[in-house]
Amino acid sequence: MSYSVQSEIPKVLQQLFPQLSEPALKAEIAQVGQVFMYQAGQVVMDYGSYIKMVPLIIKGSVRVTRADQREGREIILYFLQPGETCSMAFNACMIPKKSEIRTETIEDTTIIGIPVDKVSEWVNRYQSWKNFIMSSYDSKMVELVRALDSVAFESMDHRLQKYLLARKKTAKNAVIQTTHQEIANDLNASREAISRLLKKLELAGKVVLKRHQIEILDTLVT
DNA sequence: ACATTAAGTGATT
DNA sequence: AATCACTTAATGT
């Protein structure tokens, strides 16, 4: 209902990024920040593109993935939600370089783009900005390490369940809109394997399967 | 009604 | 667990 236009930046900052406390910082964000809106499923940044903005997510959700050259094989690094920012983008603004990752929207998403030169400038000028950058870097790093040992040590079965719970959380809805193929791509598995595991979960009374959607019941817990 | 796309199955490696 | 080769079911035109 709220269209996050330029003039609403101060209000949105207050709500979603309360840790950015300095009034002067907020004023600068409102001044140089640019609001962008993306539709669901849009690729915001792709491998090899130059990063010129660091996004503050204010609405929707975004998926950050990494693939190894050969197309069609990618793995999820983490999801971004309102109140968060893309940590991978920080690297790139200290040292200008091409993106190592792909970010695409899962839902209709709105962001405030902060020009990279401002991002590094503010680190020196505003304590709360520095803390914000550092702590989001830290929390994504933790997620990343978890994702890594999930791949290394957990069964596909367990990974799928965690994935479903994560999707449920970002969708804020027990019913997620997806296909088995999409999940298979996200988890680096074959579609058939995912279908079979989902079938098992359905038989176990943990999910309800329909075409293009999966309902995740409360009985599914990790 | 027909075509297209998603999902289910069994066999093979 | 991947791949193949189908089959079956759901949806769009």
Image (cartoon, coloured by chain):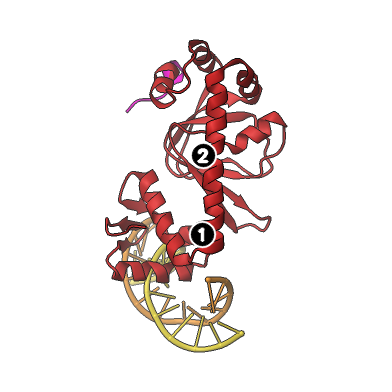
Chain colours: A red, B yellow, C orange
Residue named by callout 1: A187
Q: How many numbered discs, if any? A: 2
The answer to whether one can see residue A29 in this image is yes
Residue at image point 61% right, 35% down: A89
Image height check: is C5 above or below A163?
Answer: below
Q: Chain of mark 2?
A: A
**Residue A200 placement (x, y as % from top left):** 35, 71
Label placed on residue A70:
none
Check contact, mark 2 vs mark 1: CB within 8 A.
Answer: no
Q: Residues within 10 Å of mark 1 (few under 14, many from 20)?
A: many
**Residue A218 placement (x, y as % from top left):** 27, 55
Image height check: is A179 above or below A200?
Answer: above
Q: Which amino acid type corresponds to the residue marked 1 in the rendered image?
A: Leu
Magenta residues, start to end: A1-8
The answer to whether one can see residue A188 in this image is no
Label placed on residue A139:
2
